[in-house]
Amino acid sequence: MTAQHRLDRQHSHRADDDPATEVIPRVQESPSAAAPAPEEPSPEPEAPAGVPHLALLRPASVVKVAAGIAAVLALAHFAAAVYGLGRPGFQVPAAIRLGNELNVSTWFSSVLHLTNAAILGLIAANSVRRERWKWVLLSVSCAVVAMDEVAANHEHVGWIIHTTFGTTGFLTYAWIIPAVVLVLVVAALCLPTLLRRPGAVVVVVGAAVFLFGAVGLESVGGALFERTGDVQAFAYNVLAGTEETFEMAGLVIAMAGLLRMAGGSGLRLAGERFVDGAR
């Protein structure tokens, strides 16, 4: 062995390999002296059993935004109608005139109907099978009315009935006849199931407010139009604005009740599917 090899071995020799070296074991720290472990974040509190909720929407925010838009549209219409007093030839601008077809208020009402149809669809998907078809029927009914808001099919149906049967007075806008029949049929089929859910009273109140405007005030507007034939008159503008305001208010109220109803129906978002927490 060369001198260089001996030198390398001496440098690589560890102290623990030396018999003369005493290996002192490490002192274990007592648990009390150990550094405190970082606290784990407490899990988010889960909804108590029996109180499921809809985790997709914030009901208060949705209702407030919808109510605010409806209020702005109503104020714009009535302000324009009042501004036109004493100004011959002035007309409420078509874009903000409540009661007109194919304008901002019509689009907004259609959106409200579609929103209510979507909430009803969620409730239907989370309902027991024997009741599901009733919620589907309500959802489809709202979707059909949403389509009709922008397509104005009820105007064509009403004109056909009016010219065929010569309806007058409160039935001048004759589309309200089949509309009332369909509402009564749907109510008879679905109302008992609806009333068993939380928020049902709010939904029924909203539906009543909507129907008061859409059917009740619409029939009065038909009688007024038959007598005057002037849809630009101040009285007709006030009546049409009041009718549409009741319709939008009813839809917003019904939406508030449906959101509460959906939350009480056990809808919770879990992964990519809905889980019925009420079963």
Image: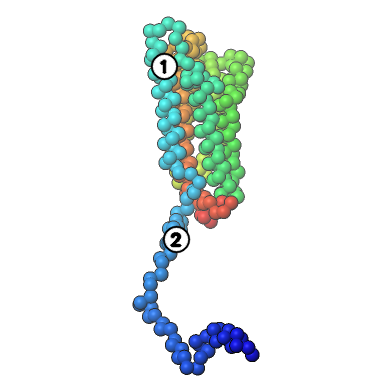
Query: Which sits in the foreground, 262 or 24?
Result: 24
Mark 2 vs mark 1: give the one in front. Answer: 2
Residue 251 spot, x, y in % from top left: 47, 33
Instruction: Give the residue type at disc 2.
Output: Pro
Tag 1 or tag 2, which sits nearer the N-term?
A: 2
Image point (59%, 39%), residue name? 137
For this orientation, the residue located farthest to the left is 32
Q: Which mark is on residue 206?
A: none
Q: Count the marks: how many?
A: 2
For this orientation, the residue located farthest to the bottom is 19
Instruction: Give the residue type at disc 1.
Output: Ala
Residue underneath mark 1: 80
Q: In the picture, which quadrant includes the N terminus?
A: bottom right
Residue 271 spot, x, y in % from top left: 57, 54
Vertical side of 164 occupied by 55: above or below: below
Q: Which mark is on residue 43?
A: 2
Which SS class for mark 2?
A: loop
Image point (43%, 58%), residue name? 45
Residue 72 spot, x, y in % from top left: 42, 26
Query: Which sits in the foreground, 85 or 212?
Result: 85
Find residue 156 and report its image quarter: top right
Find residue 174 and report its image quarter: top right
Residue 151 spot, x, y in % from top left: 60, 24
